[in-house]
């Protein structure tokens, strides 16, 4: 697989950028260190993520909302992958929007692999944030 640029963007105005590695950028919650609890509105806002991944073979934009209703808009150009991602979103009851432009004239391998990587990065970003919030003490 060719290394590519990946950008994960949580949908929260109070997030800050953290460098992960060469060509890869993710954003996560601002660590204030204050021990304040997270408001329900902020908690809901950070349960969604946007990942953009661009390699020589693919160009992917993926949005995941864990508190969705099972809606999906999947456009990978690979019928079976579209079907499986739609089923996953429907039965897990999260919203998923995936757009992938890949080198399908060669084969589907890079598109399937990179969509999986982007989806995993979106999930990981949200679960890491949730674990961080659970570990924070509440004041009050």
Image (tube, grey):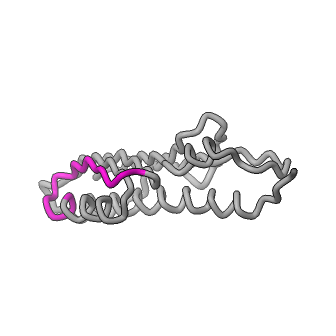
Total marks shown come to 0
Q: Which residues are magenta?
A: 68-82
Report whether 101 appears left or right of 19.
Answer: left
Tell me what residue is drawn at x 49 percent, y 46 percent: 7
**Residue 51 or 63: which is nearer the viewer?**
63
Report whether 48 appears left or right of 75.
Answer: right
**Residue 133 or 122: which is nearer the viewer?**
133
In the displayed structure, 37 sits above or below 134; it is above
Look at the image and say whether residue 72 sits in the magenta stretch: yes
The percent coordinates of residue 38 (x first, y second) are: 71, 48
Tell me what residue is drawn at x 32 percent, y 46 percent: 59
In the displayed structure, 16 sits above or below 71; it is above
The percent coordinates of residue 4 (x first, y second) are: 42, 52
In the displayed structure, 10 sits above or below 2; it is above
Instruction: In the displayed orientation, state which residue is furthest to the front.
Output: 140
**Residue 52 or 105: which is nearer the viewer?**
52
Tell me what residue is drawn at x 30 percent, y 50 percent: 71
The percent coordinates of residue 104 (x first, y second) are: 16, 55
Q: Quadrant of the N terminus?
A: bottom left
Report whether 55 appears left or right of 32.
Answer: left
Look at the image and say whether residue 73 sits in the magenta stretch: yes
The percent coordinates of residue 98 (x first, y second) are: 31, 49
Tell me what residue is drawn at x 55 percent, y 57 percent: 125
């Amino acid at each position: 697989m060719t290394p590519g640029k990946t950008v994960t963007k949580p949908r929260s105005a109070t997030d800050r950028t953290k460098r992960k590695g060469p060509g890869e950028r993710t954003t996560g919650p601002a660590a204030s260190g204050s021990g304040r609890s997270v408001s329900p509105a902020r908690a809901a806002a950070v349960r969604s993520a946007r990942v953009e991944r661009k390699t020589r073979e693919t160009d992917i934009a993926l949005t995941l909302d864990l508190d969705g209703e099972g809606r999906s808009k999947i456009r990978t150009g690979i019928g079976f992958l579209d079907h499986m991602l739609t089923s996953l979103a429907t039965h897990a009851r999260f919203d998923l929007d995936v757009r992938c432009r890949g080198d399908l004239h060669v084969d589907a391998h890079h598109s399937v692999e990179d969509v999986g990587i982007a989806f995993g990065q979106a999930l990981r970003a949200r679960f890491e944030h949730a674990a961080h919030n659970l570990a924070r003490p509440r004041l009050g």
